[in-house]
Every structure is written in structure tokens, then in C-alpha cells.
Image: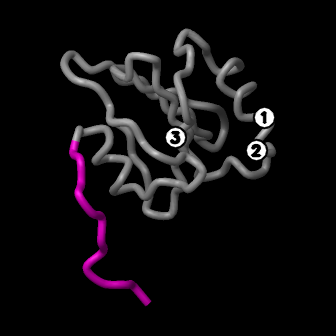
């Protein structure tokens, strides 16, 4: 089970990724964008070309963890921009196949 706290940043890499890559291969993709000290509480998601598989790479405090999901039917939806981090709610909607027309919070927390 993937457990993500509310303050986490989630980035989905644009385009297809070869999901045969392991820890080192996925980190090599990220090294150009993120420094080692910037990966606390950050989740990185990668999808394959057919968009039916997703890998999530994150730092667990003492090592990297890969979470992997393969869909039996359907595909993950195509996101327009991956430069802005996802919220936890948006990411779980992506994993569950929910396509929102508009994501609007009910209220702002102070």
C-alpha cells in the first residue's frame, strides 16, 4: 500500500519511461533535476509508453523504494504538464482512473 502524507510533492515525468529500469536507472533520470537533499517527502512517478503501468520512486528515510502498478484494463490518463507537483488527492485520482472535470477545494485551511 502506498501511503503519502498531505505535504508530499508528487511529480509525474512527461513522456514514456522504460520501466525495466531499477533504482539507479530511474535516479539517473532525476539527477539532472533534483539534488540529493531535495528528495525528502517527494514522490516521482513514471509511466510506460502504453500507459498501463506506473512506477513510483521515493525516499523512505534510509533508502529508496519503488512502488509498481500494472493495470489489467484501461490506461492512466495523459497529463498536460508535469512541471507542477500533483496534490495527494490528484495523484490518487490518477491511480484510480478518476477523471475530474475540475478540482476545486471546498475551503482553504488557514
The answer to whether residue 65 is above or below residue 94 is above
* Residue ID for mark 2: 34
- Determine contact: label 1, label 3, CB under 8 Å: no
* Residue ID for mark 1: 31
* Residue ID for mark 3: 12
Image spot of residue 54 (x, y percent): 42, 26
Main SS of the magenta part reads loop
- Determine contact: label 3, label 2, CB under 8 Å: no
Image spot of residue 30 (x, y percent): 71, 34
Q: Decide whether residue 99 is among the magenta residues.
A: yes
Magenta range is 98-110
- Determine contact: label 1, label 2, CB under 8 Å: yes
Decide: few, some or many residues near mark 2? Use Cα within 10 Å; few <14, some 14-19, many ≥20: few
Q: Quadrant of the C terminus?
A: bottom left
Which of 86 and 56 lies nearest the eye of the viewer? 86
Decide: few, some or many residues near mark 1? Use Cα within 10 Å; few <14, some 14-19, many ≥20: few
Question: Mark 1 to mark 2: distance in Å?
Answer: 5 Å
Disc 1 versus disc 3: nearer the observer: 3
Q: Decide whether residue 39 is among the magenta residues.
A: no
Q: Quadrant of residue 18?
A: top right
User: For numbered disc 2, what is the local secondary structure?
Assistant: loop
Q: Quadrant of residue 76?
A: top left
Tell me what residue is drawn at x 43 percent, y 62 percent: 6
The answer to whether residue 22 is above or below residue 91 is above
The answer to whether residue 9 is above or below residue 43 is below
Amino acid at each position: 500500500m502506498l501511503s503519502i502524507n498531505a505535504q508530499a510533492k508528487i511529480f509525474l515525468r512527461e513522456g514514456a519511461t522504460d520501466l525495466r529500469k531499477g533504482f539507479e536507472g530511474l535516479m539517473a533520470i532525476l539527477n539532472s533535476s533534483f539534488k540529493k537533499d531535495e528528495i525528502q517527502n517527494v514522490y516521482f512517478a513514471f509511466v510506460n509508453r502504453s500507459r498501463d503501468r506506473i512506477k513510483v520512486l521515493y525516499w523512505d528515510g534510509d533508502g529508496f523504494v519503488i512502488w509498481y502498478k500494472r493495470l489489467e484494463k484501461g490506461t492512466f490518463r495523459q497529463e498536460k504538464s508535469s512541471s507542477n507537483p500533483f496534490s495527494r488527492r490528484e495523484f490518487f485520482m490518477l491511480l484510480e482512473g478518476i477523471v475530474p472535470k475540475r478540482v476545486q477545494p471546498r475551503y482553504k485551511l488557514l
